[in-house]
Structures are given as structure tokens and as C-alpha cells.
Amino acid sequence: MDRIRIRGGAPLTGTIPISGAKNAALPLMIASLLTEETLELANVPRLADISSLLRIMSNLGVDHMIAGRRPGESTETGQTIRLSAKSIIDTCAPYELVSTMRASFWVIAPLLARFGHARVSMPGGCAIGTRPVDLLIMALAKLGAAIEIDGGYVVATAAKGLKGAEIDFPKVTVGGTHVALMAATLAEGTTVIRNAAREPEVVDLAECLVKMGAKVQGAGTSEIAVEGVSRLGGATHEVLPDRIETGTYAMAVAMTGGDIMLANTRPELLQFALDVLGQAGADVTPTVGGIRVRRNGNGIQPVDVTTDPFPGFPTDLQAQFMALMTRANGTSRIRETIFENRFMHVQELARLGARIRLDGDSAYVEGVPTLKGAPVMATDLRASVSLVIAGLAAEGETTINRVYHLDRGFEALETKLARCGADIERLRG
């Protein structure tokens, strides 16, 4: 099993290209099931989760082709994937495939909308709280689907097709919004999705669906209206930049010092987090095609944050920000409101010398002058990268085990950091 070894203390300088967003690419790939024509997606990151979804799609009968890089492109340049769901051979997504990644459950929406039936295993993925699919199932039922739970599978049928409906989510759900949006595009009549997620990844999916012929209004607001159409066509679409990767590297610069240009990204995708980072002591400057991040001379300042749906502070940056706060000049409170049990990184950060006290949904982080390198273990995707950030600033050597979590969500992480001066390497094992 691979490990990552870091010798901390080096500031980061140079340019880091930001990859396409995994959280946008996955629903976009799944949307190809809505049409028999080809969907071409550019700027798709090279990640384990992308490969896992391609296996699931292939099992359903989707043909795909991955285009090579153009001459002169760097190893970080996103790949182009062409997906054709013309000849679907199965509408069942089995446990052994879906259990590897929660987002794969979303295939239930286009399969049901296009073919009238789907049988999909309950999902897997990161072990963060319960993350139930109840809201996703509720949305499909509102659209007229008959739902049964059979042996760990969700069986959805709509023999006469889906019908437009009003869907009121009791709480904001990105997955539920993706599912409702995809299913509604082929439903008869108009669907209104209230308390919809406003995340940029939802907007990206909606923009792609419109290119495919869908009639969608209001994406990016809390109310989305979808007028169903009889069929969707093919399209070409570029995946938006990864705001979580952007924020992660910005926090790494604030932690280690230095001067980094984050290329191929947009500040409006994570403005709240960048504002918080500025309060913590980073100079964040939008540039043409990217963001420049430097740490000012006043050190790291403590800042209290609460995770919230977009446009608030992203839960997927909570662990990284906690790593930054371990070196702050004072105590900060980090409150997690999106997922339960998302403090699994606390124990491992403590092994590096962090002082963190948990109290319900909050972590109180008392900054320390130095962190000390040590062997640590990744527990999930975002926790693993928080250990990388801490290791970059720790004295001595840090070894991170179970880095397969990193490969699910960060493309060429050690390569990008090493090119900017980090002493980091992957140990194959």
C-alpha cells in the first residue's frame, strides 16, 4: 500500500495548475445516460473515482473513449472523455461496483427517466456519518416513481414515465438536487425543485443539460424549474475548475509561506473560503485565469468558521482549514454542520502535536508554535489532504499511510507540490 513521505519546512513557490472538479465531473458523466447520443467532456481529472465510475458505466453498456493529451500539454492537463449510452445492456448497478463510491448511486435518475426502471445498490464511499439516500428517493417518488428496497438495492419503476412535480427538500442536498434535476429533464410537464443546492457543480450540470436540449431555469438559486422534454441529444462541455483543490492549495501556501499562482481556476467558486483565508493571514489576489496566494508577515491568525452549503464555507475544506489553524496565534472554533462524524482527522493531527478539543459539532483548535513530523494514517479523502498540509509545515519527517484516499480526489498531488518546492514523495508499497 502506497505511502507519502514529507519533510516539512519548505515554502511553496511557483504555479499549480488546478484540475477539473471531480464533484462536477461525476454527475456530468452520469448525465450521459440520458441520451443515446455522445456526450464529450473536457477537463476531466485523472482520479480513482473517475475510473470507478467508468467501470460502472461500462457495466451498464456505456461506451467510452479517453482522448490523449495534445502535444505540449503538461501531465496535469485534464483528459477528454467521450461517453455513448446508445446501447444500454442493463439498468442494474450492482453492489460490488456502487459500494466503492457514493456518487455512483445517482445513475438511478437517468436510468429511471430514460428507461422507466432501475435497480441500484445502496451506495458506498467515504465513511463520513450516515449520508442517507432518503432525500434522493423522495425526489424520485415525487416524480411518480414506485420505489422498493429489496436486498440492499433500491428498485425504482415508472412504467408510464415520470411526471413533473413540486419537490421541496427539507434540507439542502447536492446529491438530491443532482438526481431531481437529471430525472426531471425527461419527465412529462414542469418540475420545480425548492431548497435546491446552489453549488457551482449543480450549475455546471444544469449548463451541460441545457446544451443537451434540456429546459432548465434557476440553477444557482434555491429554486430550479425544469420543463421536461421528450429526448436529449449529445453535447460538448468542459468541466469547471475544482474549487476544493483550489482552496486546499491556497491553505497549504498560508500554512507554509511562499508565493503561489493557482492557475485555471476562478475565485467566485469559493469566495467565502478565500475571504476566511484572508482573515487568517493570507494575501489572496485574483489574476487573469487564476488566483495568487501569499502569506503576509503577521503569521497565521485564528478564525472561527462554520461549514454551510454554498455560498458558505465548504465542508470539504473543513479538515484543511483545521490543519491551518493548528499553527494559528490563538484558539479557533470550527463547527461542522453538514456531516456528522467529520472530525476523524483530529486524532491524526494530534499525533503531529496539534491541540484540538472536540465538543459536539465543534472543534476548538489551540494553535501551537510548531508541529512535529510523525507517522499518521488517512481516514478519508479530505482528512488525508489535511495531513499533507500539516506535514508540509511540520519539523522533520511525516509519513502518511493509506493514501489511496488521496487518489480518489486529488490529481497528481505530490507532483504539483514537489514542483513548487515541497520535499514530498510517494513510496510505493
Image (cartoon, helix red, strand yellow):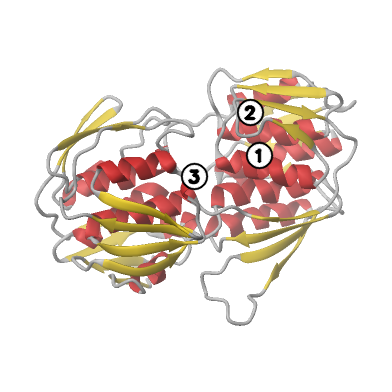
Estimate how packed mark 2 is, as few (under 14), some (14 to 19) or many (20 or more) residues with alpha carbons within 10 Å. many
Q: Which secondary structure, mark 2?
A: helix
In-front residue for pair 71/409: 71
Find disc 1 in the rendering and name its residue: 106
Q: Which secondary structure, mark 3?
A: helix
Estimate how packed mark 1 is, as few (under 14), some (14 to 19) or many (20 or more) residues with alpha carbons within 10 Å. many
What residue is rendered at 68% in x and 52% in y? 56
Residue 39 placement: quadrant: bottom right
Q: Are marks 3 and 1 in contact (CB under 8 Å)?
A: no
* Vertical side of 343 occupied by 171: above or below: above
Distance of mark 3 from mark 1, alpha carbons? 27 Å
In-front residue for pair 223/344: 223
Q: Is residue 120 visible?
A: yes
Give, as a three-letter code, the residue at label 3: Glu
What residue is rendered at 38% in x and 27% in y? 337
* Vertical side of 406 occupied by 74: above or below: below
Residue 376, horizontal then vertical, whole percent = 25, 55
Residue 40, horizontal then vertical, whole percent = 74, 59
Distance of mark 2 from mark 1, alpha carbons? 8 Å
Residue 135 placement: quadrant: top right
Left or right of 302 on screen, residue 272: right
Left or right of 292 on screen, residue 67: right
Left or right of 291 on screen, residue 323: left
Q: Are marks 2 and 1 in contact (CB under 8 Å)?
A: yes
Q: Which quadrant does the N terminus fall into?
A: bottom left
Distance of mark 2 from mark 3, alpha carbons? 28 Å
Q: Which mark is residue 268?
A: 3
Q: Is residue 345 visible?
A: no
What residue is rendered at 29% in x and 45% in y? 278
Give, as a three-letter code, the residue at label 1: Trp
Find disc 2 in the rendering and name its residue: 136
Q: Are marks 2 and 3 in contact (CB under 8 Å)?
A: no
